[in-house]
Image (cartoon, rainbow, N blue to C red):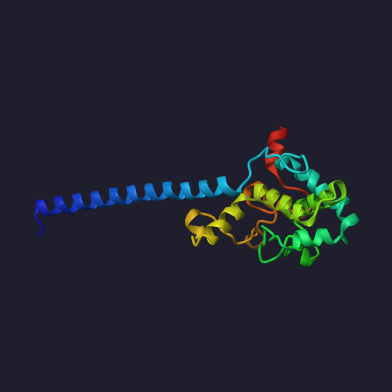
Amino acid sequence: MRSALQIGRWRLGFIVGAVALFALSVVSQGESEDVVAAIEASIIPVEGTETPYEIPLSLDSLPLFIGWWHTLVPQIDADPRYHDALIGLVAPCCDDNSAFQCCCEKGGQACNIIRSGKGLAAHLIIEHDATAETISESVLQWFRFARPDYYIAAELREQGKSPATYDLTTKGSCYRFKCNVAISEGGCGGMEELIEPAIEAREG
């Protein structure tokens, strides 16, 4: 039989081990938050950031940009700048496709995050006679602002870190059945009408 002293030592060892594991978990969590915060500060623009097209970054612009997709894209669809600017950008909702034609568009549809980028591209061509490079930079800036989760995860992957360690993923929202989830919540914002409670909340 174990003596009372042995049992006491075992219990003490268990408690010390548990406390050490908890402390390690807290430190790891803090380090993870620091890593993500550093990446966010370096590549993700904040709300209100000024842009070359004089519309500060805000999710409130989503209806406007998507409206441009409906009205302006048909006018510039054949402009080579439109193709050249978007073909080199990944679709943040399905990055095995380009922003020029995301996975949903191959099936004859389009999600609202991609519509917003295309609408902005069309506006830049029609109203600002922008170069393909300027269009690409502006759309990328918009995507990074609107879907920071994807771009932070992609940067972690680029640095050789597993996004899953930081509760992030580069697996596209299209492939995670998030087509009808708000863009501000890591989704595609809907396939028809815009789904974005963040805008509705501010309007309320």
Residue 126 falls left or right of residue 117? right
Q: Residue furthest top?
A: 204
Q: Quadrant of the N terminus?
A: bottom left
Residue at 63% from the left image edge and 51% from the top image edge = 186
The correct choice, above or below, for 83 with respect to 66 in the image is: below
Residue at 79% from the left image edge and 47% from the top image edge = 65
The correct choice, above or below, for 58 with respect to 188 in the image is: above
Q: Quadrant of the C terminus?
A: top right
Residue 104 in picture, x, y percent from top left:
74, 63
Residue 181 falls left or right of residue 194? left
Number of numbered labels in the structure image:
0
Residue 200 versus residue 72: which sits nearer the camera? 72
The correct choice, above or below, for 77 with respect to 71 in the image is: below
Residue 45 in picture, x, y percent from top left:
63, 44
Residue 93 versus residue 81: which sits nearer the camera? 81
Residue 111 falls left or right of residue 35? right
Residue 21 in picture, x, y percent from top left:
32, 52
Residue 65 falls left or right of residue 40? right
Residue at 42% from the left image edge and 49% from the top image edge = 31
Residue at 90% from the left image edge and 55% from the top image edge = 75
Asked where in the image residue 171 lies, by quadrant, the reply is bottom right
Residue 190 in picture, x, y percent from top left:
73, 53
